[in-house]
Image (cartoon, rainbow, N blue to C red):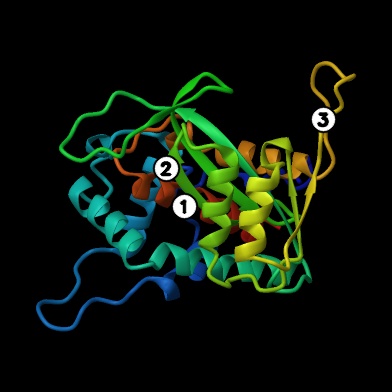
Amino acid sequence: MWTEKNRSRYNRDHLRYPSDVTDEEWELIAPLIPSAKRGGGKRRVDMRAVMNGVMYVLSTGCQWRYIPKDLPPRSTVNRYFCDWSYDGTLDRIHHALYLQCREKLEREASPAACIVDSQSVKSAEKGGAQIDPHGFDAGKLIKGKKRHILVDMQGLLLHGIVTSASVQDRDGGILLLSTLFGMFPFLKKLFADSAYEGPIFHTALASILPCLKTEIVKRSGQIKGFVVLPKRWIVERTIGWINRCRRLAKDWENLNRNALAFLKLASIRLMLRKLCNS
């Protein structure tokens, strides 16, 4: 937590850009970056500079072509961003940092409880040969994409997917949970809001994760205005943390795969700060 006493630990004015990774943060990431492929010439690209370029786009939300000249060329940064998304590098970095965060909190590697929620974001103007279709969220009156996320009780991201905004929460939640592939085998409790209530969700959940029990946290109809709801505030806080990255303020990506990659990068950025600023 930020206080006047520990303010200096959060100060990033000594960096070229506040989005750059520090020496301590890079020590956590560097061993997880794939080495150069065999054959051909030696790698001449500074991988830390590439990571700084990706983090710059994530934090500022700028277009790829507007990456500053003192960072690697936009084609190089974008190519490694796509490669890391395709070959699972981002997944490995995310999982390794997550385990370190759990160990630092003196928790088991696999949580026992989790919270599911979704966020609809507006889509920007797009053009190109391949564009994943957006949709309309009738509940929130938003035309764009929907992020379905699963977090633990500390608010750290476990898993996420990106779909059209027209996909209902219960359907996106089943797709989210069905793609865990046994990564967190000790999950026993799932907290969710009333959008995940009903026989369709519970029947599908019982077929894919029979040991996972759902608890619906409802909002009282007698309360008006904003109110903090038990357990649900944790995932809402995580969404607020992620939205600090301006690339996620809107849906700028043509492909859902790229949107999911930036979502994971935002979580990686958050865990790096938690590990290195405490």
Look at the picture and state if 125 lies above or below 57.
Answer: above
Residue at 67% of width from left, 65% of height from top? 101
Residue 214 lies, in percent from the top left, at 76, 53
State left or right for residue 248 relative to residue 230. left
Look at the picture and state if 236 lies above or below 76.
Answer: above
Which residue position is annotated with label 2? 58
**Which is more foreground, mark 3 or mark 2?**
3
Residue at 37% of width from left, 32% of height from top? 134
Q: Specify the farthest residue to the right.
A: 222
Look at the picture and state if 121 lies above or below 80.
Answer: above
Q: Is residue 9 visible?
A: no
Which residue position is annotated with label 1? 265
> How much space separates mark 1 and mark 3, taking CA atoms?
32 Å
Which amino acid, mark 1? Leu
Q: Can you tell which quarter of the image residue 119 is in?
A: top right
Q: Is residue 61 visible?
A: yes
Q: Mark 3 or 2 closer to N-term? A: 2
Q: Mark 1 or 3 closer to N-term? A: 3
Which residue position is annotated with label 3? 219
State left or right for residue 74 relative to residue 93. left
Q: Mark 1 or 2 closer to N-term? A: 2
Which amino acid, mark 2? Leu
Q: Which mark is residue 123?
A: none
> How much space separates mark 3 and mark 2, taking CA atoms?
34 Å
Which amino acid, mark 3? Arg
Residue at 66% of width from left, 55% of height from top? 203
Q: Quadrant of the C terminus?
A: bottom right
**Which is more foreground, mark 1 or mark 3?**
3
Query: Are the residues at dot 1 and dot 2 in contact (C-beta closer than 8 Å)?
Result: yes
SS of the residue under disc 1? helix
State left or right for residue 170 relative to residue 163. right
SS of the residue under disc 2? helix
